[in-house]
Image (cartoon, rainbow, N blue to C red):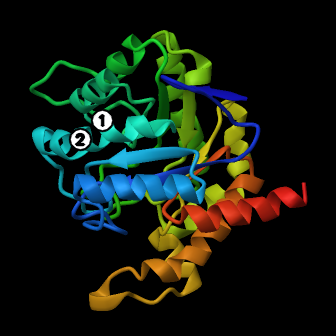
Amino acid sequence: MIWQTTRDSIDLTQPKVMGIVNITPDSFSDGGRYASTRAALAHCEQLLLDGADILDLGGESTRPGAVPVPLEEELARVLPVLREALKLGAPISVDTYKPRVMQAVLGLGADIVNDVWALRWQDAADPLDGRQVVARHPSCGVCLMHMHGEPHTMQLSPMAGDVLPAVQAFLRQSAQDMQALGVAHERIVLDPGIGFGKTVAQNFSLLARQTELLSAGYPLVAGWSRKSSLAAVAGCPAGPGGGLGDQDRMVPSVAAALLALERGAAIVRVHDVRETVQAIKVLSAIK
């Protein structure tokens, strides 16, 4: 199983770890810690030393309640880091839903577009379409995620009932739509969107039944890292000032990543790369 990206054909027969690099002041977990270009690049280098296979750069938070960032501000955050990160040798993903950002980062050589909107978002004042941006590129990889609603309000009115059929149908259709535009099957991976408009119980139902999502025929990305659903079941305390207590969420995050891999995920998107890589080695030892 191969994930074709701009510069690399990524072998997914073994689990891959995507390291999160939030170039933001307000991400739900480590917002502000890597907001400068220098700090973000140092973090990129450390994640690769820790064993990350892919780096995922993001210049806009999509946490619940997040306020959209203007296009020029997102570009100013992401592009300087991307230019340097591309020199590090690892595949570089950019987490964005804006077609103009996709166009800019692919123009610089980014390997992957990772979009929480699954290429559906469009600026009412701009005709550029993210699906066309990706389809016109000869080889970039794309990650299509399921999201109910939009980040600012998605947790105010989450999905109802059994979410797996709706998530499965959405992801399958999104992938088929991209293939109809000429995007090769091997360029596409899917993400069920843990925490994006879903309740705690629904998130864990998706994990429990994750193997059913494999029937669509595409590799899966699992993004459980430091999510509030983990804190809810593990009883993680709040951090200083009522924050999220990130270090207390590390063990539940690693556990969720391993469970996702055991249930067929090909890639785990994580903050705690070193610990996740160590745990995957233990999992691999019994196989």
Residue 114 visible at all: no
Q: Is residue 194 above or below residue 104?
A: below
Left or right, 276 with reference to 263: left
At x 24% / y 52%, what residue is drawn? Answer: 37
Q: Nearer the viewer, residue 238 or 45?
A: 45
Q: Is residue 93 above or below residue 77?
A: above
Q: What residue type is disc 2 on? A: Pro
| Figure quadrant of residue 67 | bottom left
Q: Which mark is residue 190?
A: none
The residue that mark 1 highlights is 83
At label 1, counting other C-alpha atoms closer than 10 Å, the crowd grade (few under 14, some 14-19, many 20 or more) is some
The residue that mark 2 highlights is 80
Q: Nearer the viewer, residue 92 or 231?
A: 92
Q: Is residue 282 above or below residue 172?
A: below
Q: Secondary structure at mark 2?
A: helix
Rendering coords of residue 4 (x, y %)? 58, 24
